[in-house]
Image (spheres, grey):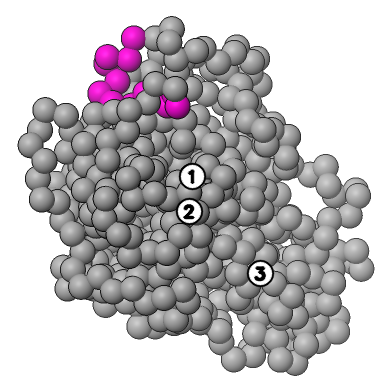
Amino acid sequence: MAGIFVFTFLGIVSANEYDFSHRQGSVPYDENTHVPIGSSGCGKTSPYGSGKTTVAKGKYAGVEWLFRVYVPNCYNVNTPLPLILQHPGWGLSAKAEEAGCGITLYADSQCFISVTPQGGNDNPNFGSWYSWNAVGSTQSPGPAGPTCTQAASDPSYCYTSCQKCTDSPQCDWTTCYDTVTPTGTGTTDVSGFIPGLYDTLESQLCIDTTREYGAGESNGGMMTYQLGVDLSARLAAIAPQFGSFHKGFCMSPQHPVPVIDIHGTRDTTVPANVSLAGNGYYYTTTAEIFGGGAYCKGWKSSNMCKEKLSHYITQWDGIKKLYCVSECEMNDVVRCSWLGGHNWFANKAADNGGLVTSFLLKWTKTSHIGRGYSKGQKLGPGHLLENVVIIGEDDSISTPSFQPEPTLKPKSRGHYGNPANGCRHDEDVILIGTGRACAPKVGSNGNDPNAPPVPHCKVEGVAPSANGCPADAPVRHFSKAWPVCLAKGNTTDPYAEGNFHCMLVCPCTGLGDSCGAHADTHCPKGARCERGELRNMAQGVCTYPLSLDSESIVI
């Protein structure tokens, strides 16, 4: 998106210049005139302490779920506060997400309740792959066919809760537990874990029901889009960060829901502007999600958008080349791009959290009276989680991400070295994360113009395998890095172009926006372990700092 947007700032029009009667509840928030609606938890003693994160667990439909709750120091049992739920990406625990996304950093200064739920982790194959059943992630093949290529097919992605994963290609890759609807898509039987969590929090805390929000990154960003559809009468706004719908599963909300989509220009994991991702999965472009297409009418239509392109100004403009565009007159459908990959904005918790919360808190859904019901409806009982238990302040039941035994052959002049020292004849210099690396080239067959190229490697994967990538690298003997093959090159659509390369995966064990110094030791000397290229947010890739002559490369 950056380098493609060329817009003139047209100004932001004051809210009082509009008639919002058609908005069905989604209106700009004005602290001078806003009238909050208190939830059923107002006046009750909070089970969560103020000024700290408390970990709790509860059951929905017999399945136990974990969530983290930060109640700000400003909390008063008689003063309704906004509520933001941030959903982690695939493979990432709620503890790691809260530290990395930066939402909770603003809870005290902006006086809102920050909640981070943890996804389902019932995959028995490789540790804990926390995930969300949403946007068709368990429903392949869909209306547009399989949601991945044959090269991406992987039976190990099948979760225990899924009845079968025998399709060819096998594209399902998340839990099948009910996180919003039984199938993770559609608009019927909306009563899964997350709707139940909203209802439960309303019953426990004093929440302003007109200011409930949804957010999340990667697979959590997909979940956020799905929640925007299924909870459109409830959520005042959503902020999906580098998320999308699988191809053929795009949906639009029945009621207006303001949305901000945040994507890195180098994101080939869940790309914004092309359908086929670097790991062989098909998604819906942001342009189609907003503008409509074969499978959805578009969010601009749902928001009754009067199209008017303008620069959406934020205080983070220019950081990592951030530029945001409002596609509608009311600034309720916004696209943001920044110079980066599949990671939180600017690879920095404070920047990401600020950008997300600043958009969300600008909106209120004055029609929502609680538990998903709107003015004019009788308030129902909701769907509360059962057996809610406070664990404490430590996410003790979270297990670490899968870390294999060393599989690489250490070799001083092996593959995956530093481009500053020169690459081997079978390697290219590829931009990876915020840096670059020598990446072994992988060939492909592409004789059919109506089908994607077929790489001479096994694409992605969550553990070491004989995938067609070289297994020698200048790493330490204890390194648990391993090679992965992806469609990756210095282009915007590498899979369609048959541009496949290998890179090193490293265990991203650190909390916060960095994988940490320990993770760096698994990479070759001079490289660091970074998120930004893989669907599994608990894993990073080894990358070397950019040189001055390569910093100008933009894809």
N-term mark: 2 or 1: 2
With 452 as the anchor, is 226 left or right in this view? left
Q: Which residues are magenta?
A: 19-31
- What element does badge 1 sit on? loop
Q: Observer-nearest residue: 125 or 31? A: 31
Q: Residues within 10 Å of mark 3 (few under 14, many from 20)?
A: many
Q: Is residue 250 visible?
A: no
Inspect the image, locate mark 1, and give the three-letter code of the amino acid beneath it: Cys
Measuring from the top left, give residue 476's x and y in whole percent: 78, 87
- What element does badge 3 sit on? loop
Inspect the image, locate mark 3, and give the three-letter code of the amino acid beneath it: Cys
Residue 247 within the magenta-colored segment of the rendering: no
Rounded to the nearest whole Å, what is the CA distance between mark 2 and mark 1? 6 Å
- For mark 2, what is the residue? 72
Q: For the residues carrying marks 1 and 3, which lies nearer the camera in this image?
A: 1
x 85%, y 49%: residue: 550
x 10%, y 33%: residue: 377
- For mark 1, what is the residue? 111
- For mark 3, what is the residue? 515
Inspect the image, locate mark 2, and give the three-letter code of the amino acid beneath it: Pro
